[in-house]
């Protein structure tokens, strides 16, 4: 065994934050249906890319879209 510290090229998988996810993961992340995700892609409301046969959705685009849809509670006067 070596007394050297671990290489900096070793990545802690738990600290990885994906920049894109496939459609089934986007569905689980948002609670939206698969068809709704595809509608949002088609309308340009969320950004996606086609890589080979895979469609990936940009996570930041999902976050931004959902934040823009947030409903604020009304104050009762």
Image (tube, grey):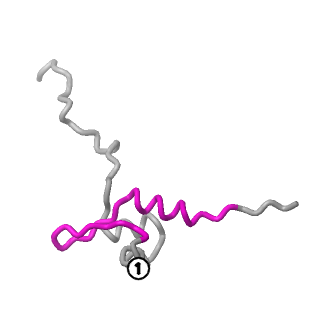
Which residue is at a point 36% across and 78% down the rendered structure image? 42
Which residue is at a point 17% across and 29% down the rendered structure image? 7
Using the image as rendered, state which of residue 8 and residue 62 is in the foreground.
Answer: 62
Quadrant in the picture for residue 70: bottom right
- Would you name the residue on which mark 1 appears? 39
Using the image as rendered, state which of residue 15 and residue 44 is in the foreground.
Answer: 44
Using the image as rendered, state which of residue 13 and residue 43 is in the foreground.
Answer: 43
Q: Give the answer, above or below, for where 64 lies relative to 1.
A: below
As for residue 8 lying within the magenta part, the answer is: no
Q: Residues within 10 Å of mark 1 (few under 14, many from 20)?
A: few
Q: Which residue lies furthest to the front in this view?
A: 44
Residue 47 screen position, x and y as percent? 35, 66
> Which element is circle 1 on?
helix
As for residue 63 lying within the magenta part, the answer is: yes
Which residue is at a point 19% across and 67% down the rendered structure image? 51
Left or right: 50 as drawn, with respect to 38: left
Residue 1 screen position, x and y as percent? 11, 23
Quadrant in the picture for residue 46: bottom left
Q: State which quarter of the image contains the C terminus.
A: bottom right
Residue 6 screen position, x and y as percent? 20, 27
Which residue is at a point 32% across and 62% down the rendered structure image? 21
Q: What stretch is highlighted in magenta?
A: 45-72
Q: Residue furthest top?
A: 3
């Amino acid at each position: 065994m070596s007394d050297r510290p671990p290489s900096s090229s070793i990545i802690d998988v738990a600290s990885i934050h994906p920049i894109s996810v496939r459609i089934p993961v986007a569905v689980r992340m948002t609670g939206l249906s698969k068809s709704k995700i595809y509608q949002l892609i088609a309308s340009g409301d969320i950004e996606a890319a086609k890589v080979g046969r895979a469609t990936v959705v940009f996570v930041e685009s999902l976050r931004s879209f959902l934040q823009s849809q947030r409903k604020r509670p009304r104050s009762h006067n």
